[in-house]
Amino acid sequence: MSLLEISEMSTGYNGVAVVRDLNLRVEEGEIVALLGPNGAGKTTTLLTTSGLNPVMKGDIKVLGKSVKGRRSHLIARDGLSHVPEDRSLFFQLTVKENLKLGAARGSVNLSQALGYFPALENLLDRKAGLLSGGEQQMLAMARALTVKPKLLMVDEMSLGLAPIIVERLLPVLRRIASETGAGVLLVEQHVHLALEVADRAYVMSHGSLAMEGDAKHLAANRHLLESSYLGGGELEEA
Ligand code: ATP
C-alpha cells in the first residue's frame, strides 16, 4: 500500500478546477519532490490531501483511506503531518509551547522531534516570533514530527531562507525518511536542491502533471524540466 495515492484527481476553488487529473504516489521511506512554476497547483494539491479543499474528481488515499468527506484533523490523526507554506506558528508562544500544541494532536514525542533539530534545544523558552527564519522552519518541521507522522508534507520549506540554511535542512528530511520510514512529499522552488534530496519528482504545470521521473535522472537531464517551466516561471540555475 502506498502512503499517499492520488488518482485522476481534480480539485480547485468554488467549483472551478485548478488541478486536473493528477496521479501521484509516495511510498514508505521515500522523498518525493513536487515541482513546478508559481500557480501550477502544488499548494492546492497539498491542501486537498490534508482535507482542507474538496476532491472534485478522482480520489486521494492517505494510508489507504480516501480523504473524501473526511475532516482534516481525522486525516492528521491517521498519520499525516502538513507543514504549510506560512509555517503556522504561534509567534507569541515559546518554542516549547508550539511543540506541545503540535503534540496535543496525538502521541507526544518531543525528544525525537528535537533529536532531528538539536538547535531548538537551547531555544525552548524563546518566543517563536523572535526566531530566525531558519529556526522557525525547524520549529514548524519539529512540530510536525511530534505526532510521529507516516506521511510528511512540507510546502516551500526554503521560502525566505538562505540557500545555505536550506542545504542544512534538506538532509534532515532524508534522515527522517530513512530512520522513521515516513514518506515525504516536498514542494520546493529550489529545483536543484530538491532533486538532490528526492528519490522521485513530479512536475506540475498549469494544474496538470507535466512530467514525473527519477530525481537523479531529472537532475542529470535538466533540459527535460525546462519545457515544464517555460511561460510559467523560472527554473533557477544550479
Ligand atoms: P505557488 O508556488 O505560487 O504557491 P502553486 O503551484 O502552489 O504555486 P497554487 O497556490 O496551488 O499553486 O495555485 C494554483 C491555482 O489556484 C492558481 O491559479 C491560484 O491563483 C489558484 N488559487 C490558489 N488559492 C486560491 C483560492 N483560495 N481561491 C481561488 N483560487 C486560488
Image: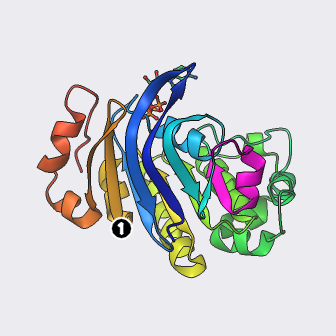
Relative vertical location of residue 25 with respect to residue 230 in this rendering, above or below: below
- The picture places residue 88, in percent across and down from the top left corner, at 71, 40
Relative vertical location of residue 190 with respect to residue 173 in this rendering, above or below: above
Residue 219 shown left or right of residue 46 in the figure: left
Image quadrant where residue 76 sits: bottom right
Image quadrant where residue 144 sits: bottom right
**Whether residue 160 is visible:** no
| Ligand 1 contact, mark 1 (Cβ < 8 Å) | no
The one of 107 and 176 positioned closer to us in this rendering: 107
Q: Which residue is mark 1?
A: 199
- The picture places residue 58, in percent across and down from the top left corner, at 47, 43
Label 1 residue SS: loop
Residue range (magenta): 68-83
- The picture places residue 199, in percent across and down from the top left corner, at 35, 67
Name which residue type carries label 1.
Asp
Relative vertical location of residue 72 with respect to residue 216 in this rendering, above or below: above
